[in-house]
Image (cartoon, rainbow, N blue to C red):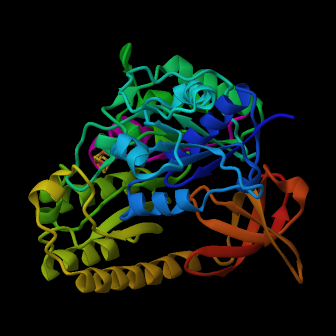
């Protein structure tokens, strides 16, 4: 009987895709994949360290691992906490057999094998420059979306961010390899390609810097079978006129741009080392909207960064109002290990103040989203159907997204999964729209 492996994933799309890659690697090593951790011979915990207390959560999870028959599975810890904590994980938990850093992912099966054979724990948190990955190896469970990594790591060292320490310096994947993977995913039926990188729009092929992000959008656009192209996450300072023109001119590139702001105060942005100001950010928004009037913008914001005053926070609120974001991820600042802010900037804003600011910001954003979504009522929009949601009195509910990345729920049929349908919008809330399918071909 084949051994079974279960992969638990925390964190961002990069981590989700790393888990898809590890699923392929362990499958090739002879494991059958399972979602049932209690039935697994190998448990891989793919960790994220962006949020506070990530390490504590990991050790809590490790303590809870066990199988119904009383045996303990082999346990591998991978991802950002593995990279950050390394051997300390083995010192703190006797339940871990393998620790694999973010750059050593391809060595997972080898290290699991060695741990299994020798009974000794294995670790590899070394840096590796090679970011290639065997074509066709990733196990993509999502029938619609295909994540494709184009850059690993980051050189920007924003003061609050742990990524350059956990994912290493920026390394570009060769363009030919990226395009081969896009073709492979599209041929397997994935309609929506998500290009991934810490600063995805900083892409250029190391062998030929003229092959930049705008060039890549054009190339992916030509791949047969690709219907939509999305990407995450761009950095405002690397949005070029060529990139905006590509988004404007290429119909498969979705009319949605995630533009992480972090703060609306130029003083805070400077301390964060973001390398743009309130004014240049607003000018960029203007430039993008002039070229693509119906584009939806979304953003990330941190409240309570060291030294953030009431006035700085007001600047954030006024910028959020001025732009009118369609979506937002907002967080309270917390120190992350090794970062410039953790080393040099005392965490001055009290927790109660951070909580109050976050609640104020989220309430303001909810009102903005409700207002923007209400404008869609009565319109008919193309929606790529990507999931089943729930059964209701009026039929089985399905869900999909508009090109602007808004979630739309509607009664539907399983055979519509993966196709684009026209939905007339009847109702709007802060987080999603609701409608009826009025045509199956768009
Ligand atoms: S650009 Fe800044 S926030 Fe983004 S991954 Fe790099 S260091 Fe982190």
Nearer-the-camera pick, 75 or 308: 75
| Residue 86 visible in the displayed image | no
| Residue 131 visible in the displayed image | yes
Nearer-the-camera pick, 101 or 121: 121
Nearer-the-camera pick, 304 or 432: 304
Q: Quadrant of residue 240?
A: top left
Q: Quadrant of residue 229?
A: top right
| Residue 241 x %, y % | 34, 39
Give the residue drawn at x 46%, y 81%: 366
Position of residue 228 in the picture relative to residue 81 (left or right): right
In this rendering, the answer to whether 24 lies above or below 357 is above
Q: Quadrant of residue 399?
A: bottom right
| Residue 303 x %, y % | 27, 72
Residue 440 in magenta stretch: no
Nearer-the-camera pick, 351 or 373: 351
Give the residue drawn at x 16%, y 51%: 340
In this rendering, the answer to whether 194 lies above or below 411 is above
Q: Specify the quadrant that holds the N terminus.
A: top right
Give the residue drawn at x 12%, y 58%: 271
Task: Tally the numbered discs.
Answer: 0
| Residue 50 x %, y % | 38, 56
In this rendering, the answer to whether 279 lies above or below 213 is below
Position of residue 246 in the picture relative to residue 70 (left or right): left
Q: Which residues are magenta?
A: 222-245
Give the residue drawn at x 26%, y 77%: 318
């Amino acid at each position: 009987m084949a051994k079974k492996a279960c992969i638990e994933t925390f964190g961002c799309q990069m981590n989700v895709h790393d888990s898809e890659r590890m699923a392929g690697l362990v499958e090739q090593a002879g494991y059958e994949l399972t979602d049932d951790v209690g039935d697994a011979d190998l448990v891989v915990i793919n960790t994220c360290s962006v949020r506070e207390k990530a390490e504590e959560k990991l050790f809590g999870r490790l303590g809870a691992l066990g199988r119904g028959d009383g045996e303990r599975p082999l346990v591998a810890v991978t991802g950002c906490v593995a990279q950050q904590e390394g051997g300390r994980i083995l010192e703190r938990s006797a339940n871990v057999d393998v620790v694999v850093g973010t750059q050593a992912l391809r060595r997972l099966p080898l290290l699991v094998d060695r741990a299994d054979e020798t009974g000794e724990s294995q670790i590899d948190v070394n840096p590796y420059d090679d970011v290639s990955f065997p074509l066709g190896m990733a196990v993509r469970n999502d029938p619609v979306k295909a994540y494709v990594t184009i850059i690993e790591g980051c050189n920007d060292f924003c003061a609050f961010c742990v990524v350059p320490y956990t994912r290493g310096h920026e390394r570009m994947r060769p363009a030919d390899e990226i395009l081969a993977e896009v073709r492979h995913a599209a041929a397997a039926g994935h309609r929506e390609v998500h290009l991934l990188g810490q600063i995805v729009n900083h892409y250029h092929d190391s062998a030929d810097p003229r092959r930049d992000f705008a060039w890549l959008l054009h190339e992916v656009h030509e791949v047969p079978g690709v219907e939509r192209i999305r990407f995450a996450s761009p950095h405002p300072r690397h949005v070029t006129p060529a990139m905006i023109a590509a988004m404007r001119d290429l119909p498969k590139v979705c009319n949605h741009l995630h533009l992480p702001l972090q703060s609306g105060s130029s003083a805070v942005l400077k301390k964060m080392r973001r390398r743009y100001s309130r004014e240049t950010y607003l000018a960029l928004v203007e430039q993008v909207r002039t070229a693509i009037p119906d584009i939806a913008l979304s953003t990330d914001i941190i409240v309570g960064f060291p030294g953030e005053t009431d006035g700085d926070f007001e600047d954030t609120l006024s910028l959020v109002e001025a732009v009118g974001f369609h979506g937002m991820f907002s967080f309270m600042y917390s120190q992350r290990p090794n970062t410039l802010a953790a080393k040099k900037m005392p965490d001055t804003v009290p927790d109660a103040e951070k909580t109050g600011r976050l609640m104020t910001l989220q309430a303001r954003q909810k009102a903005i989203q409700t207002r923007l979504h209400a404008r869609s009522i009565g319109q008919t929009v193309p929606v790529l159907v990507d999931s089943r949601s729930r059964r209701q009195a009026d039929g089985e509910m399905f869900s999909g997204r508009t090109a602007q990345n808004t979630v739309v729920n509607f009664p539907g049929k399983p055979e519509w999964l993966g196709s684009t349908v026209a939905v007339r919008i009847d109702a709007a809330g802060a987080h999603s729209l609701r409608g009826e399918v009025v045509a199956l071909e768009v």
